[in-house]
Amino acid sequence: MASSQITLSYTRLFRGEVTQTALDKFFHDMFALSVDKEALDMQLSKFSKDQLVQTTSPTSSIFCTALSQVKKPYDERRHRNAVDTLAALLTSVVVRHPSISGYEASIIFAGSMVQSDKTFSDFVSLVESTISHPGLDPAFRHQVLQLGFLFMLRMSQLSPGAYFLRRDIFPSLCFFIKDPDTTRYTFEAVLFLTLLSNFHKQNNMSKQNIYLKHLTGLTDRKVLGSICWAANYVLQLAIDSYRQGEDTPSQLNYLNPVDSFMSLSKSILKVGTDILPLPALLGSSPADSVKSHLQKQPIEGAVICWTLYEVLLVNPSFPTLLIDSIDGEDKTQIPLVFSVISLSSFLFSHATSIDTSRSFDYAALCMALLDAMLAQQAILDGLLRRSADIILCRQREPPLPSAQDGRLAICALLDCCVLWLRHNLAKRFPVHQYTLCVRTCYRAIYELGQSSLRLEYHWKTFWDALIGLLQFLSSRLEDLATTGGVEILLRETLSLLDLCLQKCEAFLPTPQAVHEFMYELAAKSNVIKKQPETLNAIADLSSKSSLNEGYQLDALDNILATVEFYERQIVGARTASQAISTLGKLIEADGLYLAKQTPPQPLPASQDMLFFIRTAYRDCLALVG
């Protein structure tokens, strides 16, 4: 009965059957009825965008009157229905008219440009005052938070979104996050904040973005800790979803006012959760039955990685909290950094095997996130001193070697890089992400060498992945010639390999491991010897070649001289064991042969990844829209 009443109300309103004098009573009665999104959308479908922009359109009356209703003394039923009406109206209009301009949005929702300033200012004021009102129903405050979040998502980068920059709601968002009554909704609050801090980030308006300034200067450990807390919970769900056959997004039930976020997080973040993994795939590409599951991954909640990256990039206090989670006394809680590494392993394994831009965008984001984490010396030091059994993806062949119990956390990060290097040598080669991967490895190896930490690790897997990348670049150069950044990738890969040569005696665990490394290079000398030819070919194909940069040429000369020297020493060896033994005796007698010492060069930190914003908007809409 109520449904038919609200449908009749919409019909009368859009037909213009409600007189001006009767509007107040009409809306008072309408907001007593539950919203029927389909019925409202059906009425809107009868209007073209041009018709909606006309001043006779009822959309502005609905928007402004619903806004006025929420500003009145609290009436749970009418307030909730008014907010639902605003959300349904925003969604229906923008989905039906995705090319809407800021001017058109102002007319449709405010009635005129003259009224738009007051209307949208009132809207932002409503969001600010409601979410920070401790006396209101927490579920209603959450509903209004979602409305503000939805408004920014639907408006995208249009001018009405700028009203959130005029009025600073950051203190209200922080209050909402810290309030025990609304802590369970932290996830959406921090995503909303991330969205606000990215408004017009690609142009000069970002310099005036108050939310970006707040994120940069934020020192409140309770707010920063809540970001970590929310992110860790959702990342664990994302990891579990990769490892299970059933759909997991429904487990994000804390987005609705049900169970306490704290109790949920405590139950899921315990170490040793028994989850059966998907069976290892039999080939290099996922089988159809598994592919169907993987195409849905990661869950939309993984968009929280965007927040982590943005905060880590600008906030100097944030790395300290990440380190605290690594060094914390409670060893039953999985540190957030470990969760990022774990999820990254799944994303890297399937970045290009699943033919979706979304899967790749997440993998690229997490590669940048890992690189940004290692750029923080404190985080890198934490990974070098804390042992951890981190869950890693083993769904692709060949699987990673079995990990030793109690190995250092940096080993899992190196494994992630191996997974990226192995499994994304695709036709549409992601050059920039491979460069980030190589830089991430460089940071790790550089620090291992500086600290003389002899790391127990399956190094052969790492050497194979690194040399495999060089082989791919040489064999596919014609296909990659038009792909920007190939020369930079090749030069930095050679720099990494040279760094490994220079520092191997400092970070490899035993003399035997050093001998085996020299053997791997000598045994694959044909790949190494192709690199001068490859660099020259790139220089011929590219008008922007930077081949005259001296360091990488020195690195290549050093690698070639070392490889050729040890290659000559094992001529006549019948087996790998015999060759390694020969090299071992030579190195023990004469020391490691290095033709030329070249100083390691620290690499610059990651930059903003604006490409992810489109994917972020889509997944945020899937969560709240």
Image (cartoon, rainbow, N blue to C red):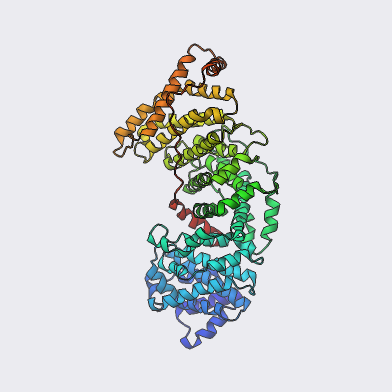
Q: Position of residue 325 (x, y in %)?
A: 63, 50
Q: Classify 136 as above or below 349.
A: below
Q: Position of residue 61 (x, y in %)?
A: 47, 78
Q: How many marks?
A: 0
Q: Residue at the location (53% across, 66% down)?
A: 170
Q: Quadrant of residue 589?
A: top right
In the image, 34 versus 483, the foreground residue is 483
Q: Residue furthest bottom?
A: 21
Q: Residue at the location (60% across, 67% down)?
A: 175
In the image, 327 versus 541, the foreground residue is 327
Q: Can residue 247 be seen in the rendering of this structure?
A: no
| On-image quarter of the N terminus | bottom right
Q: Residue at the location (62% across, 55% down)?
A: 229
Compared across the picture, whether 624 is left or right of 605 comes to right
Q: Quadrant of residue 409?
A: top right
Compared across the picture, whether 137 is left or right of 547 comes to right
Q: Position of residue 604 (x, y in %)?
A: 44, 44
Q: Position of residue 276 (x, y in %)?
A: 67, 42
Q: Classify 588 as above or below 301.
A: above
Q: Residue furthest top?
A: 572
In the image, 237 versus 266, the foreground residue is 266
In the image, 152 versus 555, the foreground residue is 555
Q: Can residue 398 be seen in the rendering of this structure?
A: yes
Q: Classify 3 as above or below 19.
A: above
Q: Residue at the location (47% across, 82% down)?
A: 17
Q: Classify 604 as above or below 142.
A: above
